[in-house]
Image (tube, rainbow, N blue to C red):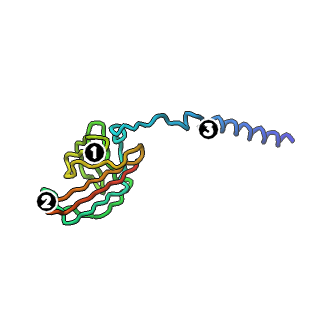
Amino acid sequence: MKPNLLVVLFLSVCGIINYGCSKTGAADDNPGPVSTDPAVLIQNKWQIVRDVINVNNFAFPDGTIPNGGTYYGTPNDYYDFRADGKVYIYEGGPVGSSPYQLVSPTILYMSSFQWGNVTILALTGNSFVWEKSMTSSNGGTYYRRVDFKR
């Protein structure tokens, strides 16, 4: 009878220790307020989910002809928007960096790339989507949409 009592006591003590060490409670269930300010939300390292480019007889003003297609990001691909006003881009390899400015809650300007202003379609704590549409002097069209997650 004593060995059974010892087993019961041992298991009871283990259960109490386990319960005391578990993370539960209101503080864990509520991480606190999440900002809805786009200037705060954009300052993150955003992983590229998908980058779609559709091109129809289009050339940038400098004569560059973009390639169309869909690129599916890897865990290494990102746009890193930093508080110092620079974005660092890695998409299939290092692309570069650019100053950026949030012109309005729906307009983002990246000066070093031929995109200029892009339209923000969604920006939350864990997803970000922007798009860019352009028409060249010959009537050709360019459309790009990039989906991100955090």
Q: Which residue is mark 3?
A: 22
Up the image or down, 24 lies above or below 55; here it is: above
Q: Is residue 95 left or right of residue 42?
A: left
Q: Are marks 1 and 2 in contact (CB under 8 Å)?
A: no
Residue 35's spot in the image, x, y percent? 41, 36
**Mark 1: which secondary structure?**
strand
**Mark 3: which secondary structure?**
loop
Q: Is residue 141 left or right of residue 52?
A: left
- The kind of residue tagged 1 is Ile
In this rendered view, identify the residue nearer to me: 72 or 93: 72
Q: Disc 3 or 1, which lies upstream in sequence? A: 3
Residue 92's spot in the image, x, y percent? 30, 57
Q: Residues within 10 Å of mark 2 (few under 14, many from 20)?
A: few
Up the image or down, 44 lies above or below 77; here it is: above
Q: Residues within 10 Å of mark 3 (few under 14, many from 20)?
A: few
Residue 137 image label = 2
Up the image or down, 75 lies above or below 44; here it is: below
Q: Which residue is mark 1?
A: 107
Residue at 55 percent of width and 33 percent of height: 27
- The kind of residue tagged 3 is Ser
Residue at 26 percent of width and 49 percent of height: 118
Q: Disc 1 or 2, which lies upstream in sequence? A: 1
Q: Quadrant of residue 18?
A: top right
In this rendered view, identify the residue nearer to me: 15 or 124: 124
In this rendered view, identify the residue nearer to me: 66 or 123: 123
Residue 105's spot in the image, x, y percent? 31, 41
Real-space CA distance between mark 3 and mark 1, rounded to the nearest whole angstrom: 44 Å
Q: Residues within 10 Å of mark 1 (few under 14, many from 20)?
A: some
Q: Are marks 3 and 1 in contact (CB under 8 Å)?
A: no
